[in-house]
Image (tube, rainbow, N blue to C red):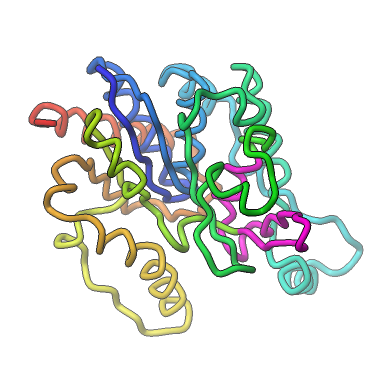
């Protein structure tokens, strides 16, 4: 049976999305259209390209997440370097290795640009800080004078996963100048709104890397770091939580991953397996009673 799918962001927690996909696939569902943000954009792009859950599991077993943290080499002492890089480049890591890895994986299925995917097969969310707007890729690219069919899928995903201050922003070049683009999770970490019209054609299933709003614990804010975390989380979720109603909730699998931090790229192989198993088990439970 064909369905549409939405995958939320969550950084390293996104390994749980692979387990969810595995359970969905085993149940006989096939995704027609996909959307995602950040880690969800990465998983959605792999599924859109035609990878099975087993192929993705095999892929990440060979992957060392720490390899994506490409720092700049310099003779400046390390402590000073971090501050200088953060100030001038607006991110600790370049993100080039991550983009190359995504491009390499997609190329195995013959996917390079959006022209290599069926029309409306994949949409990912990014944040255009220059314009102060949400960027839906590839839909919004003509507004920038860019042909969406010639735009790199890997570049679009790289934009969506660009965690502020962690990865350098992507500088999108247009005739009007450069646009600074970062993680789509700033504006919509769970873009289920994209499929409101499609909902009438086929079921829409969302996978969200958090608990239901009513089940979330109140934030404790006692210092500047906790304040920043609360600010970022509120920005990420406010738009989506307002949109999600009880009507939508019955079509959303909630995966409240608590024991892993989104930017903990030192996650071990054992932790990856636990996240995948967690996502699969929760999804299997959900699908037993899902009445789409």
Q: Is residue 67 visible?
A: no
Q: Nearer the viewer, residue 250 or 105?
A: 250
Q: Position of residue 121 (x, y in %)?
A: 46, 29
Give the quadrant of residue 279.
top left
| Residue positioned 74% across, 74% down in the render | 87
Give the quadrant of residue 229.
bottom left
**76 relative to 200, above or below:** below
Q: Nearer the viewer, residue 260 or 171?
A: 171
What's the magenta region?
Answer: 155-181
Which quadrant of the figure contains the C terminus?
top left
Q: Position of residue 118 (x, y in %)?
A: 50, 23
The image shows a total of numbered marks equal to 0
Q: Nearer the viewer, residue 50 or 279?
A: 50
Q: Is residue 49 visible?
A: yes
| Residue positioned 43% across, 36% down in the render | 272
Q: In the displayed structure, does residue 127 sit left or right of residue 256? A: right
Q: Position of residue 219 (x, y in %)?
A: 28, 74
Give the quadrant of residue 89.
bottom right
**204 relative to 211, above or below:** above
Residue 179 among those drawn in magenta: yes
| Residue positioned 53% across, 44% down in the render | 139
Q: In the displayed structure, does residue 234 sit left or right of residue 288? A: right
Which quadrant of the figure contains the N terminus?
top left
Residue 153 among those drawn in magenta: no
Q: Position of residue 152 (x, y in %)?
A: 67, 36
Q: In the displayed structure, does residue 123 sit left or right of residue 64? A: left
**1 relative to 212, above or below:** above
């Amino acid at each position: 049976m064909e369905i549409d799918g939405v995958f939320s962001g969550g950084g390293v927690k996104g390994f749980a999305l692979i387990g969810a996909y595995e359970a969905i696939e085993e149940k006989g569902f096939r995704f027609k259209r996909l959307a995602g943000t950040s880690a969800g954009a990465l998983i959605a792009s792999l599924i859109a390209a035609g990878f099975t859950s087993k192929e993705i599991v095999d892929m990440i077993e060979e992957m060392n997440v720490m390899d994506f943290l490409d720092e700049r080499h310099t003779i400046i002492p390390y402590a000073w370097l971090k501050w200088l890089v953060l100030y001038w480049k607006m991110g600790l890591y370049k993100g080039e290795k991550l983009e190359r890895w995504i491009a390499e994986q997609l190329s195995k299925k013959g996917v390079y640009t959006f022209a290599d995917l069926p029309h409306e097969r994949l949409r990912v969310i990014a944040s255009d800080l220059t314009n102060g707007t949400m960027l839906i890729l590839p839909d919004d690219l003509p507004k920038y004078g860019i042909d969406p069919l010639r735009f790199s899928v890997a570049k679009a995903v790289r934009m969506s996963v660009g965690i502020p201050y962690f990865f350098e922003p992507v500088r999108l070049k247009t005739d009007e100048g450069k646009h600074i683009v970062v993680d789509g999770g700033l504006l919509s970490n769970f873009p289920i709104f994209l499929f409101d019209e499609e909902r009438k054609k086929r079921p829409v299933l969302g996978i969200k890397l958090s608990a239901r709003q009513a089940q979330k614990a109140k934030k404790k804010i006692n210092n500047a770091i906790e304040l920043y975390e609360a600010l970022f989380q509120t920005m990420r979720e406010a738009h989506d939580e307002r949109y999600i109603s009880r009507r939508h909730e019955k079509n959303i699998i909630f995966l409240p991953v608590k024991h892993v931090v989104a930017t903990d790229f030192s996650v071990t192989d054992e932790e990856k397996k636990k996240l995948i198993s967690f996502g699969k088990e929760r999804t299997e439970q959900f699908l037993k009673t899902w009445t789409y």
